[in-house]
Image (cartoon, grey):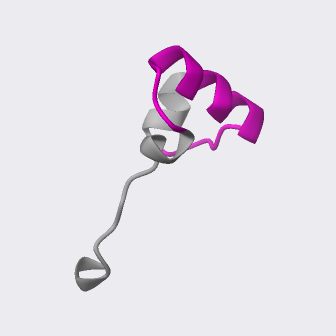
């Protein structure tokens, strides 16, 4: 399942994102890639 997330084939449920963030001791927002609008 995690492999699907990493390869962007699947998106985790919100509850799963919170669990991943808790395990990694990070904020949920830190799990998202930040995009620079100049490079879209």
User: 22 or 2: nearer the eye?
Assistant: 22
Rendering quarter of residue 34: bottom left
Residue found 32% across the figure and 81% down from its top: 37
Q: Is residue 27 left or right of residue 1?
A: left
Q: Is residue 1 visible?
A: no
Residue 11 x/y as whole percent: 63, 44
Residue found 54% across the figure and 28% down from its top: 21
The reply to whether the magenta stretch includes residue 34 is no
Q: Which residues are magenta?
A: 8-27
Q: Classify the position of the N terminus by image quarter.
A: top right
Residue found 38% across the figure and 53% down from its top: 33
Q: Residue furthest left?
A: 39
The reply to whether the magenta stretch includes residue 20 is yes
Q: Is residue 40 left or right of residue 23?
A: left
Q: Is residue 24 visible?
A: yes
Q: Quick check: 25 above or below 4?
A: above
Q: Quick check: 9 above or below 4?
A: below
Residue 39 x/y as whole percent: 23, 78
Q: Is residue 15 left or right of residue 38?
A: right
Q: Quick check: 24 above or below 4?
A: above
Rendering quarter of residue 4: top right
Rendering quarter of residue 9: top right
Q: How many marks?
A: 0
Q: Classify the position of the C terminus by image quarter.
A: bottom left
User: 2 or 13: nearer the eye?
Assistant: 13
Residue found 51% across the figure and 37% down from its top: 27
């Amino acid at each position: 399942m995690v492999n699907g997330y990493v390869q962007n084939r699947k998106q985790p449920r919100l509850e799963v994102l919170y669990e991943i963030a808790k395990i990694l001791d990070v904020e949920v927002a830190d799990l998202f890639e930040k995009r620079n609008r100049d490079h879209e």
